[in-house]
Image (spheres, rainbow, N blue to C red):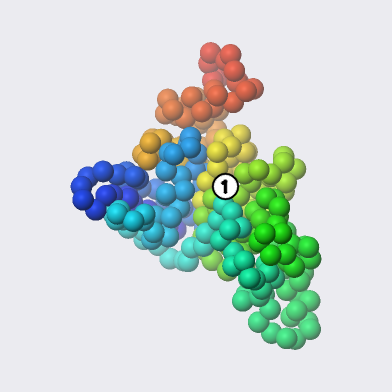
């Protein structure tokens, strides 16, 4: 289990925080969602967990636990423009020239959502959905204990998003992968996450569960996010939803 202890991003020259001190846990086999409006600090949290802070700022706090962490980035812009997706993944999947291992590797690509078209593409050739699948596959093939997935379904249609979340849920359940999923889509997190972290203005305002949000047993801001969903407009009481 990862224990995030008072993790923060603070200015070098004073007490200004981009990300205020926050603490939570992430267990293997668990999906923890991170929700909040734009600018709430969701992506900053992911980068802080990887040990990165913007220029002029420093990290505070620490992370304790056993296991490695990989990032599934928001965009395929993180890929080398001179290498295909196949070349990026070859470090883990094509280490041997043995035909049997090569066949097994291609089979595993398909389980990661990587078809021949994506495998042979360079980053400028990837659509938004293809890029999301490539970024997620690059994180998954590293066989880490935990993955930080930054908006893995943003821009995908409902079918594509459901397929991606089902893939992640299966990985969590069958391989005991711990997943921190950053998303702007509360509805999707309510369906797939075990717990939800709620950020606002760089502060952790709630650590809750989908069930607690649905019944209104949560922080006021979490309740406001729930009530902002179109299907809940006009509801005066969350319990009535």
| Residue displayed at 72% across by 39% down | 158
Q: Quadrant of the C terminus?
A: top right
The quarter holding residue 107 reads bottom right
- 107 is higher (above) or lower (below) than 60: below
The quarter holding residue 84 reads bottom right
The residue that disc 1 covers is: 151
| Residue displayed at 22% across by 45% down | 15
| Residue displayed at 72% across by 41% down | 157
Q: Is residue 19 left or right of residue 107?
A: left
The quarter holding residue 95 reads bottom right
Disc 1 packing (10 Å; few <14; some 14–19; many ≥20): many
Outermost residue, left direction? 14
Q: Nearer the viewer, residue 48 or 223?
A: 48
For the residue labelled by badge 1, is the local secondary structure a helix, a strand or a loop? loop
Res. 190 in view: no
Q: Is residue 152 left or right of residue 59?
A: right
Q: Nearer the viewer, residue 54 or 215?
A: 54
Residue 52 image position (x, y, % from top left): 39, 59
Residue 152 image position (x, y, % from top left): 61, 49
Res. 13 in view: yes
């Amino acid at each position: 289990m990862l224990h995030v202890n008072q993790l923060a991003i603070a200015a070098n020259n004073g007490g200004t925080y981009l990300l205020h001190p926050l603490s939570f846990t992430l267990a293997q086999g668990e999906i923890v969602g991170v929700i909040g409006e734009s600018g709430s600090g969701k992506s900053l949290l992911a980068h802080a967990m990887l040990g990165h802070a913007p220029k002029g700022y420093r990290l505070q706090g620490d992370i304790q636990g056993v296991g490695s962490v990989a990032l599934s980035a928001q965009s395929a812009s993180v890929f080398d423009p001179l290498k295909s997706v196949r070349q990026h993944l070859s470090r883990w999947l094509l280490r041997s020239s043995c035909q049997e291992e090569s066949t097994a590797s291609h089979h595993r690509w398909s389980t990661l959502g990587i078809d021949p078209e994506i495998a042979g593409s360079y980053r400028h050739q990837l659509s938004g959905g293809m890029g999301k699948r490539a970024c997620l596959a690059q994180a998954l093939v590293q066989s880490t204990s935990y993955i930080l997935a930054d908006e893995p379904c943003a821009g995908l249609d409902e079918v594509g998003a459901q397929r991606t979340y089902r893939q992640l849920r299966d990985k969590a359940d069958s391989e005991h992968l711990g997943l921190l999923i950053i998303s702007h889509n509360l509805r999707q997190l309510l369906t797939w996450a075990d717990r939800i972290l709620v950020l606002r203005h760089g502060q952790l305002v709630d650590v809750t569960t989908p069930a607690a949000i649905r019944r209104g047993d949560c922080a006021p801001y979490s309740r406001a996010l729930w009530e902002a969903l179109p299907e809940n407009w006009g509801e005066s009481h969350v319990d009535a939803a």
